[in-house]
Image: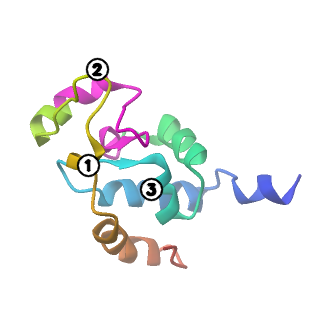
Amino acid sequence: MSTDRSRTRMDDVTVERVLRVVEAIPPGRVAAYGEVGAIAGVGPRLVGRIMRTWDSGVPWWRVTNASGDHPLLARALPHWETEGIEVKPNGRGCRMAQFGADLDELRAAAREPLAELGGLSG
């Protein structure tokens, strides 16, 4: 197994780090897979894999691609409507400039939950 693969394993701590960052995204805001990954210390593809597998207990609808598009928009829409996130004209997601989470605030909100797991990222 290569070193690169071992860094991107979906072990319990890695999964928990990603989920804790997602839980820290405030209502009415979204963060891109890469932004979540940067704070959790993993790549955006691994964030996507984790979200596909363990998304039910976290606000998964707040994680989008870098353009604000959501792969499960039809399922996310009721949550977005409740939180005031508006769909952009192309109908694929939201405007990151308007609804993207403040990354400094997200990093600060995730700091303590991540520290509980040992070691900080970001």
Q: Position of residue 93 (x, y in %)?
A: 30, 30
Q: Position of residue 119 (x, y in %)?
A: 55, 79
Residue 59 is inside the magenta segment: yes
Dot placed on the residue nearer the N-terminal end, 2 or 1: 2
Q: Which residue is mark 3?
A: 35
Dot placed on the residue nearer the N-terminal end, 3 or 2: 3
The kind of residue on which mark 2 rests is Ala
Which of 121 and 35 lies nearest the eye of the viewer? 35
Q: Dot 1 lies on which element?
A: helix
What is the total number of numbered labels drawn onto the structure image? 3
Q: Dot 2 lies on which element?
A: helix
| Distance of label 3 from label 1 (alpha carbons) | 14 Å
Q: Which residue is mark 1?
A: 97
Magenta stretch bounds: 57-78
Q: Which residue is mark 2?
A: 74
Q: Position of residue 35 (x, y in %)?
A: 44, 56
The kind of residue on which mark 3 rests is Glu
The kind of residue on which mark 1 rests is Ala
Q: Residue at x 41, y 27 (%)?
A: 71
Q: Position of residue 32 (x, y in %)?
A: 41, 47
Q: Is residue 100 left or right of residue 110?
A: left
Q: Which callout, 3 or 2, points to the residue nearer the camera? A: 3
Q: Is residue 15 left or right of residue 8?
A: left
Asked if residue 4 is positioned above or below residue 39 in the image, the reply reads: above
